[in-house]
Structure formats: C-alpha cells, structure tokens
Image (cartoon, rainbow, N blue to C red):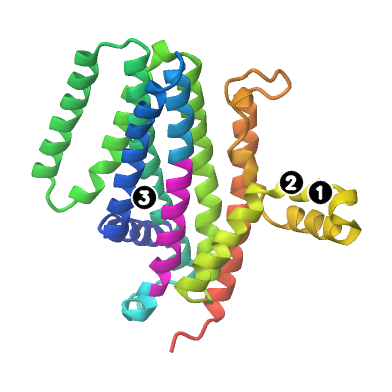
Amino acid sequence: MTMRILAIALNAYREAVRARVLYGLFGLALATTAYSMVIGAMSLHQEKRVVADVSAASVSIYAVLVAIVLGATSLHREIELKTLFPILTRKLFRHEFVIGKFFGIWLTLSVFVLLDGGTALALIAYLGGRSPLLLLGTIAVLGVQLAIALYRFVHVRVFVLIPFAAAYFVAMALLASPAGPERTLVITSCVLTVAEVAILTAVTLFFSSFSTPFLTAIFTLAIFVFGRSADTLANLPVKTVGAFPKKVGFVVAKIVPNLHLYVPERALLLGEVDALPPGPYALRAWAIALFYTALLLTLACAVFRKRDLQ
C-alpha cells in the first residue's frame, strides 16, 4: 500500500512541476519577493523588517494560490483524460489514489515554499550585512550542483529539485543569521505556510472528488476567506451585526479550519509574546493542520470511492 501511494505521489509531483501555471505563479512570487527590496529602500532604516514582512506574506499568498490551482485541477484532469481508468484496473484502491495525489501536490508546494522562502532569506542576509560575494558564491555552488544533477540523472531530473530546494533554504537560513529576528520571522512563517497549504490541499481534493474544477476553486477560496477570518467571525459585536448574524458567524468559525493561526501577529512570530513561544505555537498549529488534513482526506476518499466515473 505504501509503495502504491508513493508511486502516485511521485507521479503527481512530476505532473505538477510541468504545469505552466506553476512557473507563472512562482515567477510572480519571486518578483514580489524581489520588489520588497524596493519597498524597503523607501522606508526609514526599516529595510530588513519591510523585506521580511512582505516576503512572508508573499510566500503565504502565492502558496495558497498554487494549492487551489493544483488541487482543483489534478484529480479532474485524470478523470477527464481517462488516465485514471487504466491505473485503477491494477491493484490500486481509489483511496490510495487520492492520498497519493495529496502527498504529490503537498510535496510540490513544499518545494515552492522552500525556494521562495530561501530567496527571501538571501535578501535578508544581504541586508543584515552578509558579504554579497559569499551569498553569490553559495548560490553559484548550489546552482552548479543542480546543473550537474540535472545532467547526470536524466530520467529522474524532475525530482532533483527537491533536495536542491531543501539545501538552498537551509544554506540561506544559515547565512541570514546576522538578520536576527527577521530571519526567525521568515523561517517560522514558511513552516506555518507548509502546514496551511496542507489543509487547503485536502480541502481542494475533497471538493474535487465530487465537483468541477471551477466550483472546487470557488468553494476552496470561500473556505480560505472564512478560515482567515475565523477569529473575527467568532467575535462579531452583537450591537453592530445583531444576535442572529453573531450566532451564524460563531458557528461558521467553529466549523471551518482557523487559518488565521498560520498568519499570526509579528510579535508572536518573533517570540515577543511570553505566553506563546514560537516553537510550541508552531507545533500546536501543525497538530491542528494534521487533524483537519486527515479528516478532509478521509471524507474525500469516502466520497471518491462512491463516485460514478463513467
């Protein structure tokens, strides 16, 4: 079972990294991260803070968009092109196919976050006083290693980017140590973003198990908006909105995943809130993400198993 899920996951990753829309969104994400340098230059001695804040927000929002696009189209494409039918004729259950798709998309999103987050850390390292030659030299060495790996491992070259993204992120995180709290903010934000997109990927797979890509994207976007506003919905003022809207908002806030947990205040990300250290907070957020992901994947598998694919 594990090997069958792994095979589907790797195939889903291979298909995702070949999607043109992924490269477009990745290019926009890098452009936004780079543009944060321009915005930071306009601030009064707050360059590192501006770059860290804009980059963290950029990583989060573009990762969410990629999760919605890939999750909404991946399962439907297999059914529409009828590539799913020969796969299911083998010793593969439908729930294994859904779970494999989830891990493949999530792996793609993790690589996306690592590359974009690593670029943000490189900019912060430069602003923190790290030598430009050291930064460029490190990136050049990693780039040469990537090129060699792409040349030597032709048949699995799409998977070479996975260890490269991890090495790039770790290297830039180490080089960004002079940036201090801004480095902590970007790293913690990336960790929380990977957890958030796991929930949204599971949401898209649940809706795509019985709906069209367009409706799946709309439903997932609605869940995202309600999830990011969960704290506000749970605390609507009665005098302003009335008793009934307050109850509705409270119920909605309790049903949808509270995605506001994954974009906390700056003070919390920097460890300035004594009652909520960043480490335990991130672990709690990940535990909640794992719960919702497991629940939604279970529902998606149950629905997809009953779906008529004819």
210 in the magenta segment: no
For disc 2, the neighbor class at 10 Å (few under 14, some 14 to 19, many from 20) is some
For disc 3, the neighbor class at 10 Å (few under 14, some 14 to 19, many from 20) is many
| Callouts 1 and 2 close, C-beta under 8 Å | yes
- Left or right: residue 273 compared with residue 56: right
The answer to which quarter of the image holds residue 45 is top left
- Left or right: residue 9 compared with residue 185: left
- The stretch in magenta equals 59-76
Residue 175 seen anywhere in this rendered image of the structure: no
| Callouts 3 and 2 close, C-beta under 8 Å | no
Amino acid type for the residue under numbered disc 2: Thr
Q: Label 3 belongs to which residue?
A: 108
Q: Label 2 belongs to which residue?
A: 232
Amino acid type for the residue under numbered disc 1: Leu
Sequence-wise, the earlier of marks 1 and 3 is 3
Q: Label 1 belongs to which residue?
A: 236
Please name which of the two marks, 1 or 3, marks the residue nearer to the observer.
1
Indicate the position of residue 281 as horizontal and vertical percent values. Answer: 64, 30
